[in-house]
Amino acid sequence: MTKDIFSNQYWEKAWEDDPNTQDKWMKRAGLGDPSAPGFEKWAENFNKNSFTEESQHRTKRIMNWIEQQTGRFSNLSVLDVGAASGVFSVPFAKEGAKVTALEPSPILHDMLKDNANHYGVTLKTLNQSFEDAQLEELGQHDLVFASMCPAVTTWEAVSKAIDIAQKFVYVSLIAGPKENSIVDEVVAFLDEESQPMTADMYYLLQLLYFNDYTYETLIERHTQHNDKPIEDVMQQLPQWLKEVEVELDEQQLASVEHYLRDKYGDTIPVITGGKFGKVSVSYTHLTLPTNREV
């Protein structure tokens, strides 16, 4: 066993077999499916929040970190995988990058094109999934960028990104359990058992190391404190609980609402967040090593 853990084959299989990776967990929960009920409303809220002052500050902070590795974005060709409505594609294009934005959801793809027009930037958009897109279609790019993208949560997908990149690959992933103070409190109140998501970043770092890549990484914990009306909390609670694979019936939800009103009144303090990791892989080792185990 000790010998096995120093093999990239061991970590590839461990990642593939883990039932609680982001990709498998989201599919079980029915999240991120453009055909699922409620996706359009989620997309509208996501798009609305993507260009707020707070979101733009976060985007700029991440881009500054990447720029330390890549240098200036001007004339850099960028493939934005899972571009959504353009939260990063638009700022990259504003900085002079030549952006190809890949987004499988027709709803988000339309929002992406609208946002590009609104902010006066030129970029190429592709309405298809990273999984289905062929290397010949995508071409080569200086930077392949995937921020919290469910499509790039397997070693196979990361390897595909590496094949496309000529200089850099950026991937950000969950690096620890997501945090939600109300979910924790409700699960404990009802004596339910939650199922947290695996930290995919752990597997990625192991595989980058054992495959001899050169990379920079940063793990951070972020939290947000918000006071929410109890009506908003009760509306969002089923979705929050779904994220830890807990479902409640109407009687349980009524019991929870009564408990929360007794304890907090009409306004509920909610703390959300978690640990997140980002990795920038350097072009100097983007070619797979000749001694790589297969």
Image (cartoon, rainbow, N blue to C red):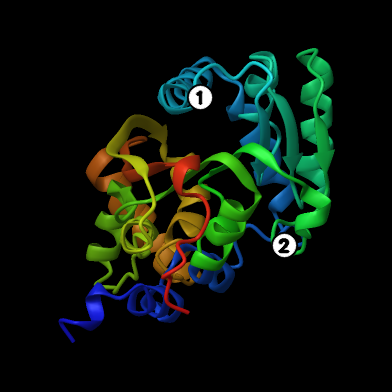
Q: Residue at the far left: name it.
A: 2
Q: Position of residue 185 (x, y in %)?
A: 25, 55
Q: Which residue is mark 1?
A: 59
Q: Position of residue 176 (x, y in %)?
A: 29, 54
Give the class, few, some or many, for how many residues have Cα within 10 Å of label 1's Cα (few <14, many ≥20): some
Please tell me whether residue 107 is drawn above or below residue 206 in the rendered image: above
**Which of the image's four quarters has the N terminus?**
bottom left
Given residues 72 and 146, the one toward you in this image is: 72
Q: Residue at x 33, y 41 (%)?
A: 217
Would you say 77 lies left or right of 60 here?
A: right
Give the class, few, some or many, for how many residues have Cα within 10 Å of label 2's Cα (few <14, many ≥20): few
Q: Residue at the far bottom: name it.
A: 1
Let me know if residue 276 appears in the view: yes
Kindly identify which numbered label has been placed on residue 155: none
Would you say 52 lies left or right of 263 here?
A: right
Q: Residue at x 76, y 42 (%)?
A: 108
Q: Residue at x 42, y 81 (%)?
A: 17
Q: Position of residue 91 (x, y in %)?
A: 63, 20
Q: Residue at x 56, y 19 (%)?
A: 52
> How far apart, in angstroms, are the residues tagged by discs 2 and 1?
28 Å
Given residues 247 and 3, the one toward you in this image is: 3
The part of the image, by quadrant, that contains residue 142 is top right
Given residues 39 and 206, the one toward you in this image is: 206
Kindly identify the amino acid type of the residue bearing the numbered disc 1: Thr
| Total numbered labels | 2
The part of the image, by quadrant, that contains residue 120 is top right
Please tell me whether residue 76 is drawn above or below residue 255 in the rendered image: above
The part of the image, by quadrant, that contains residue 18 is bottom left
Kindly identify which numbered label has been placed on residue 36: 2
Please tell me whether residue 206 is drawn above or below residue 220 in the rendered image: below
Kindly identify the amino acid type of the residue bearing the numbered disc 2: Ala
